[in-house]
Image: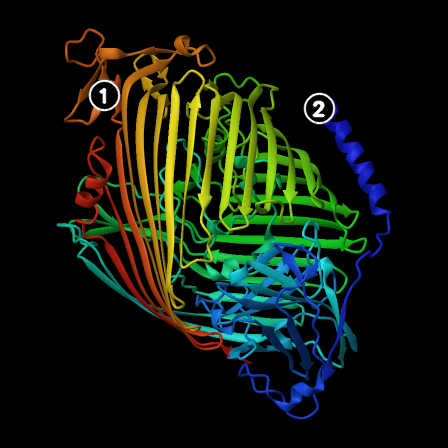
């Protein structure tokens, strides 16, 4: 396998170098618009386009439909004009509509993109790779996004600009005024920018564009037309300071005897955010003592298999411009948990403290839920020569738990002072068809002689190199990457790292691994290679990715597993033009197989899935998966690899026309092992109601049941040594997600999110593994009635002679039954009283409790959740953006 991998790598490198030498030709017939500099007064932005200055520019029309049909004249024409002066670029749009009374003017928060809208995309660098997008809906709601790598749209970018819309007898009109300070461009006296105008005609479900781009193209920004005539404009430095103040009050159930839980807390904090333009195309963003109280809560999750759940980042400072820092270890088109692995996962910064205080009987403690971010800064930009870079640094405070015993107090460190550093750079070559990048990250903790040094590393470094080459109008591409990690700490900390859940060097059957108890560092690496065709109707990709046993990314990145080599292939066909009853759709097939570093074949699966939109705008999807091998290295929580049953699964969903005021749908999945020892199914329904343009509500309900003949618990040292104890599990889960949005104006909104979640699990028929790779009946021995439940201690014990007395002092294991009930909600009122400055009123709820695992779900939800007094947080946040 090693020789094959080396040969493949050398062939890919040779192939790549040959491709680098090619000089691509521009095969796109680009339209041009010639703008003019304003003479006289600038237009007043009121949406009416009646200022005389607009007569200085020419209207341009000739839009073509992009979907559902492609490259045919648009059914409803669109016209636009562009003007500029020293500080701003101005745009006017006339969106003709044969039925003005039917124009969809749905309201939403910024970046909602509801109803009819018009959008301009600028490639102001004219690098054919990146851009900026400004959108306004017929209702006057703004949307803005930054674009990178052709298709990556970042809605977190919120520049300051101005827009208004108006209805007319011929349709609707819009005006935009965009400061040059919000755009990045060169210092050339005469500029050429990439330009694209898009219109969404909501009730027809159609999109039209000024510059036609084929629906099956593998590019977007590269296909833009050109904006010419920009002369004498100077790059401008962006300088913005945004202080904030927050007042909050918190209520929760008081706890008798706990001096830290009297039932209410109040607080006040302040901080500042800022943007400083070092040059026009290099920006320094910073935040001091940031607050993210207005951010929506994460969805509830219950994990039984030990793997960490990946949550998306929602904090504005870390979301905006996050694309430049992204270094994914794998960019496969085949599904796999490894697809979430990356060098930088910003949720690590300001996360939950890693330590927990050691308590004695009668002690109470108070500790923060998250570590405090003292400050963070990021420097990012893109040069005229195609170099994109980002540097981020953040410091989180040392956190201490305050421990009280009858008025006597002490403190324990539960999170050390920590510095996080991230650097990422990418250079484009070969007319932007080749990109070479690198990344380096560091985590440094001040541990000194702290007790946490026995299990927490004090230094962690990761880095990597990646390359992407595209050819034939970027229809084909070749990708490769290599990454490494090195963590260091005390011998105890590195030993703990080698034996933790993700590494498990001490697995009894892992003959290729061993624990080094004298090591003070751990090194690992990963790599991937992929070739793909993304243009045209027929598409495919195939590749390989690996994670060495010593790889460790979770100090600042995200990593699911180690000691794996995954090989995958994907093929698909796209329907890009209406055919019969179908508007568009796709059919896909996938295959993935997995090995470990000893050469053991761990897993193999085959999948087929499809999706389609019909001409009545209903949608449908389905999937079918067959699993032919499944050996888990983690199922026994540090024990030997377990041969798990293979099987099949299928599912699908159907959704109604989402243009209607009431839209709805349902989905479901079913899976079963061939030997019927595993079975699970889920069913979900959802509905969205839009009774008026300013109001929308949605509800989703998801129910699932899961049963497995054996689900194992973390291993136990019982009497005569290690036993791997598990049992038959019956788990039932239901989750409700409700949302309500009321938009009083485009700048004044009210949003509610609420999600009750409940999961019950009951174990029975306990058993012990005796041969983890044998056939099902020979794999374990059943305890039967040799296991007795001790209700007083809430634990099970072994009682082979059935006399009601445990066979030995250590012949016990905890009752694994569970009942997890949680309710999370946010009510946020947001007013952007002037562009860039906001006031937030927030009410958050978080209630977590339990119940009887054997009870029915819905009665338990009502009795144990809504009857509980939860934790309520009331918050007022004020911000003001100063443009310097």
Task: Give the secondary structure at mark 1.
Answer: strand
Query: x and y percent of residue 608 in the render?
Result: 56, 32
- Identify residue for label 2: 2
Work out which quarter of the rendered image holds the N terminus and state it. top right
Work out which quarter of the rendered image holds the C terminus and state it. bottom right
Q: How is the image coloured?
A: rainbow
- Tell me if residue 505 comes above or below residue 820 in the rendering: above
Query: x and y percent of residue 135 in the render?
Result: 56, 68
- Tell me if residue 120 comes above or below residue 492 in the rendering: below
Residue 468 appears in the rendering = yes
- Tell me if residue 606 comes above or below residue 363 in the rendering: above
Q: Which residue is located at x 35 percent, y 29 percent?
A: 706
Query: x and y percent of residue 458 in the render?
Result: 50, 44
Query: x and y percent of residue 539 in the render?
Result: 69, 40
Q: In this rendering, would 877 be left or right of 315?
A: left
Give whichever of 586, 163 is nearer the camera: 586
Residue farthest along the top direction in this orientation: 801
Residues packed near mark 1 inside 10 Å, few (<14), some (14 to 19) or many (20 plus): some
Residue 324 appears in the rendering = no
Q: Which residue is located at x 47 percent, y 13 percent?
A: 773
User: Residue 127 lies in what quarter of the image?
Assistant: bottom right
- Marked residue nearer the N-terminal end (2 or 1): 2
Residues packed near mark 2 inside 10 Å, few (<14), some (14 to 19) or many (20 plus): few
Do the CB atoms of the residues marked 2 and 1 lie less than 8 Å apart? no
The Cα atoms of the two marked residues, 2 and 1, are separated by 48 Å
Task: Give the secondary structure at mark 2.
Answer: helix
| Marking on residue 517 | none
| Marking on residue 796 | 1
- Tell me if residue 761 comes above or below residue 554 in the rendering: above
């Amino acid at each position: 396998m090693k020789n094959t991998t080396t040969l493949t790598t050398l062939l890919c490198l040779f192939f790549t170098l040959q491709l680098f030498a090619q000089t691509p030709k521009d095969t796109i017939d680009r339209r041009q618009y010639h703008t003019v500099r304003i003479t006289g007064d600038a237009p007043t932005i009121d949406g009416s386009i009646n200022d005389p200055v607009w007569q200085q520019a020419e209207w341009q029309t000739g839009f073509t439909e992009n979907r559902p049909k492609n490259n045919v004249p648009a059914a409803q024409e669109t016209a636009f004009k562009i003007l500029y002066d020293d500080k701003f670029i101005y745009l006017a749009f006339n969106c003709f509509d044969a039925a003005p009374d039917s124009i969809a003017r749905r309201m939403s928060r910024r970046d909602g993109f509801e109803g009819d809208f018009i959008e301009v995309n600028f490639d102001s660098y004219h690098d054919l790779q990146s851009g900026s997008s400004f959108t306004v809906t017929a209702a006057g709601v703004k949307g803005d996004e930054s674009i990178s790598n052709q298709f990556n749209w970042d809605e977190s970018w919120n520049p300051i600009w101005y827009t208004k819309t108006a209805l007319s007898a011929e349709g609707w009109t819009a005006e935009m005024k965009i400061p040059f300070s919000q755009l990045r461009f060169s210092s050339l006296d005469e500029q050429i920018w990439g330009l694209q105008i898009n219109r969404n005609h909501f009730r027809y479900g159609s999109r039209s564009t000024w510059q036609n781009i084929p629906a099956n193209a593998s590019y977007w920004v590269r296909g833009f037309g050109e904006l010419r005539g920009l002369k004498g404009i100077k790059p401008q430095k962006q300088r913005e300071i945004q202080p904030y103040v927050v007042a909050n009050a918190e209520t929760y159930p008081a706890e008798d005897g706990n001096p830290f839980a009297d039932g209410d807390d109040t607080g006040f904090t302040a901080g500042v955010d800022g943007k400083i333009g070092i040059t026009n195309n290099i920006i320094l963003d910073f935040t001091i003592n940031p607050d993210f109280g207005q951010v929506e809560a994460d969805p509830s999750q219950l994990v039984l298999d030990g793997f960490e759940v990946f949550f998306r980042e929602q904090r504005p400072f870390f979301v905006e411009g996050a694309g430049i820092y992204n270094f994914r270890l794998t960019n496969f088109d085949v599904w796999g948990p490894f697809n979430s692995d990356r060098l930088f996962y910003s949720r690590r910064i300001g996360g939950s403290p890693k330590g927990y205080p050691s308590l004695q009987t009668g002690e109470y403690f108070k500790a923060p839920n998250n570590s405090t971010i003292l400050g963070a800064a990021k420097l990012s930009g893109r040069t005229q020569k195609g170099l994109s870079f980002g540097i981020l640094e953040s410091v989180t405070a040392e956190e201490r738990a305050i421990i009280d015993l009858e008025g006597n107090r002490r403190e324990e460190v539960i999170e050390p002072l920590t510095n996080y550093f991230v650097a990422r750079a990418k250079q484009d070559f070969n007319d932007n068809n080749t990109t070479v990048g690198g990344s380096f990250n560091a985590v440094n903790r001040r541990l000194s002689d702290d007790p946490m040094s026995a299990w927490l590393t004090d230094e962690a470094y990761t880095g990597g190199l990646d390359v992407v080459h595209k050819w034939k109008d970027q229809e084909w591409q070749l990708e490769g990457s290599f990454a490494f990690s090195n963590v260091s700490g005390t011998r105890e900390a590195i030993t703990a790292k080698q034996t933790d859940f993700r590494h498990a060097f001490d697995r009894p059957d892992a003959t290729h691994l061993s624990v080094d108890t004298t090591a003070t560092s751990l090194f690992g690496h990963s790599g991937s290679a992929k070739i793909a065709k993304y243009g045209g109707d027929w598409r495919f990709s195939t590749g390989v990715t690996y994670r060495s046993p010593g790889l460790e990314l979770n100090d600042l990145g995200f990593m699911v597993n180690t000691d794996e080599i995954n090989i995958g292939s994907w093929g698909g066909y796209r329907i890009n033009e209406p055919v019969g009853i179908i508007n568009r759709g796709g059919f896909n097939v996938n295959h993935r197989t997995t090995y470990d570093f000893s050469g053991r074949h761990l897993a193999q699966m085959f999948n087929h899935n499809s999706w389609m939109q019909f001409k009545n705008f209903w949608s449908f999807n389905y999937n079918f998966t067959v699993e032919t091998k499944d050996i888990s290295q983690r199922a026994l929580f540090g024990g030997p690899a377990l041969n798990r049953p293979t099987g099949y699964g299928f599912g699908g969903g159907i959704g109604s026309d989402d243009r209607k005021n009431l839209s709805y749908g349902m989905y479901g999945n079913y899976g079963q092992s061939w030997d019927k020892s595993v079975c699970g199914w889920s069913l979900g329904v959802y509905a969205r109601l839009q009774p008026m343009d300013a109001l929308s509500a949605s509800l989703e309900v998801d129910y699932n049941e899961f049963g497995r003949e054996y689900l194992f618990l973390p291993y136990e040292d019982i009497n005569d040594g290690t036993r791997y104890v598990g049992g038959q599990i019956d788990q039932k889960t239901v989750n409700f997600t409700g949302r309500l949005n009321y938009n009083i104006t485009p700048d004044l909104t009210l949003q509610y999110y609420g999600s009750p979640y409940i999961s019950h699990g009951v174990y029975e028929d306990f058993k012990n593994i005796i041969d983890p790779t044998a056939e099902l009946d020979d794999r374990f021995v059943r305890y039967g009635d040799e296991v007795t439940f001790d209700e007083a201690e809430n634990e099970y014990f072994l009682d082979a002679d059935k006399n009601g007395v445990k066979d030995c002092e250590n012949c016990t294991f905890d009752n694994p039954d569970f009942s997890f009930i949680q309710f999370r909600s946010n009510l946020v009122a947001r007013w952007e009283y002037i562009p860039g400055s906001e006031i937030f009123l927030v009410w958050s709820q978080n209630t977590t409790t339990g119940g009887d695992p054997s009870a029915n779900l819905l009665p338990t939800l009502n009795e144990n959740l809504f009857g509980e007094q939860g934790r309520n947080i009331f918050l007022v946040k004020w911000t003001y953006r100063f443009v310097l």
